[in-house]
Amino acid sequence: MSYKILVPEGITARGAEILRAEGWQVDIHQKAAPPEELAKMVPPYHALLIRSGSKVTAEVIEAAANMKVIGRPGVGVDNVDIAAATRRGIIVMNSPQGKHGLDG
């Protein structure tokens, strides 16, 4: 199965290369979208790779029909509604040292 990953706030070429080398489809946008717009984008995706500008609200999580994981390469996940993700069985994680794959 090929997983679809949405990266709404950009990623380095190397970061995208690493993900695509696994056979995953990676769709990259360069600017954070407001939650209402993000909710319209997420339904087909299995993973969401966010930075601090993305607000993953309960509305976004409810729209994410196929979502398995929300990852934050960086510190903290205070911009994610953890309770809503938990109810849907979506894993939320961060990687404090992982931010370097997103930075230019």
Image (cartoon, rainbow, N blue to C red):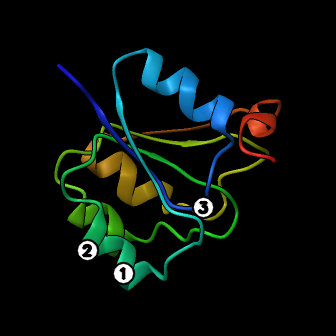
**Residue 45 at x, y percent in the picture:** 27, 47
- Seen at 49% across and 54% down, the residue is 82
Quadrant (top left/top right/bottom left/bottom right) for the N terminus? top left
Q: Which residue is mark 3?
A: 9
**Residue 28 at x, y percent in the picture:** 48, 53
**Residue 30 at x, y percent in the picture:** 59, 65
Q: Which residue is mark 2?
A: 40
- Contact between marks 1 and 2 (CB within 8 A): the answer is yes
Other-residue count near label 3 (Cα within 10 Å), few / some / many at <14 / 14–19 / ≥20: some
Q: Amino acid at mark 2?
A: Lys
Q: Amino acid at mark 1?
A: Glu
Q: How far apart are the two marked residues, 1 and 3, measured between alpha carbons?
A: 13 Å
User: Which secondary structure lies at badge 2?
Assistant: helix
User: Which secondary structure lies at badge 1?
Assistant: helix
Other-residue count near label 1 (Cα within 10 Å), few / some / many at <14 / 14–19 / ≥20: few
- Seen at 51% across and 61% down, the residue is 8
**Residue 26 at x, y percent in the picture:** 40, 40
- Contact between marks 2 and 3 (CB within 8 A): the answer is no
Using the image as rendered, state which of residue 31 and residue 66 is in the foreground: 31
Q: Amino acid at mark 3?
A: Glu
Q: Which mark is residue 37?
A: 1
Other-residue count near label 2 (Cα within 10 Å), few / some / many at <14 / 14–19 / ≥20: few
Q: Which mark is residue 82?
A: none
